[in-house]
Amino acid sequence: MKKTLFKIFRVAAKTSAVIVLVALLAVFATSVSPVYDFESPKPFSGPDIYNPYSALDSTVTWKRANFHTHTRVKGPLPPNECQYWPAETDAAYRRLGYDIVTFSNHNELTKHPYDSTLQVNVYEHGYNIFKYHKLVFGPDKVDYFDHLLPLFTFQKQYQIDRLSRNSDFIQINHPLRTLGFPNSQFEDLEGFSIMELDSGKSTENEYWDSSLSAGHYSFGLANDDLHYPDRSGRIARRSNFLYTNSARYEDLKKVLLTGAYYSMRTPDYGDGDWDVKYAANRNLPKVTGIGIKGGDSIYIALSTAADSIRFSGQDHRTLAMAKDTTYAVYAMTPDDPYTRITAYFPGGEVIYSNPFARYDASVAASPFRPTTHKVNMLLTILFNLLVVALCAGDIYLIYRVVKL
């Protein structure tokens, strides 16, 4: 009896050891990456101020959108991302007043359920342990490579660079819910166009300011990251209002890359009472005017009085604050690299503007800068030799354990 128990224990221990070693081998094998030298932070500067809302006029309307949406997909493991198919998820959003819904399932390009002219090729990249995910807009195919343990900044940068080769632009997803993603890494990361805002843990978006303060310009989108359209606390909590007459991709791309939109956080109106939720979502606070006047004065006008309107700037500093008002203005000084606006409402809603940043209009069309990181050949060779050595050592250990 003892011999039998010992054999069972021995087999179980060997199996467990092999499983752990194979898992480590997968982590090591997917760790290959260039190692980069990043330039020091360089705050925005220049005689001009970029106005993401310069194209606003009376002939265009705001359209409400969610770009980070998961649905049921065809495959061996339904319901996969969600229990509901794209058409059902789209219908749930439209009942809540949304005009634009795109489907960003993990590592899959999902077809629009009923109108091919509204097709947006976008998917969420990443199945790694840390949930370092990106939305990839405009690809013609999925890139399945991922680091299972993207610990280092240069690994995260390599993923952005790699995905950018076959896409129009990249969004960094839910930074607050990504493990191993300190704000300091945003001082180096570049090459993405959009930052996902407000993951539910905070309304502050300090990580965005870390990136902006280092001179990496990006716009902000607040998305539901929806998996449960049947749960009132999960749907219509975050949204974006785009200044566009069309929901076709070419028009959306133009707006998303010029910044003529604002984002909003909303409470779960009715706390499960869908009739209350539907009604409240049709009567949200709105931006009625936003932009620059007099050369350097940033202003915002609202349909409903906000408890406070804050102008934030370099290093997440508060530059100005207005209380209990529908209108606020802040004159940027020559020492202000950028400012962005956050409006807080008594009902719990929060509105976020895109950043107004300094640049030189005679040199560039916007504050977006070409990427400057360069491959450090010596460190790249040494790092990847280490990866190879770890893989070889792991394979040897697997061999020894199996032979025991």
Image (cartoon, rainbow, N blue to C red):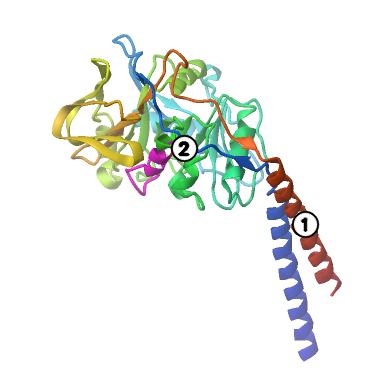
Where is residue 381? Give x, y as percent.
74, 46
> Badge 1: how crowded within 10 Å, few (<14), some, or many (20+)?
few
Foreground of the two, 24 or 238: 24
Residue 218 in view here? yes
Foreground of the two, 395 or 76: 395
Q: Which residue is mark 1?
A: 389
Under tag 2, what secondary structure?
loop
- Under mark 2, the amino acid is Pro
Q: Which residue is mark 2?
A: 41
If the image is split into quadrants, where does the C terminus sit?
A: bottom right
x 45%, y 23%: residue? 256
Residue 237 in view here? no
Work out how far the residue at label 2 is from the one at label 1, CA to CA, in angstroms.
34 Å
- Residue 208 covered by magenta stretch: yes
Q: Is residue 256 above or below residue 374?
A: above
x 32%, y 9%: residue? 59
Where is residue 230? Give x, y as percent.
41, 43
If the image is split into quadrants, where does the N terminus sit?
A: bottom right
Q: Is residue 226 above or below residue 368?
A: below
Q: Quadrant of residue 111?
A: top right
Where is residue 19? Give x, y as percent.
72, 64
In the picture as drawn, the residue positioned furthest to the right comes out as 403
Relative to residue 386, is residue 297 drawn left or right? left
- Under mark 1, the amino acid is Ala
x 47%, y 25%: residue? 368
Mark 2 / mark 1, whichever is N-terminal: 2
Q: Is residue 21 above or below residue 243?
A: below
Q: Which residues are magenta?
A: 198-211
x 27%, y 16%: residue? 295
Where is residue 264? Give x, y as percent.
32, 34
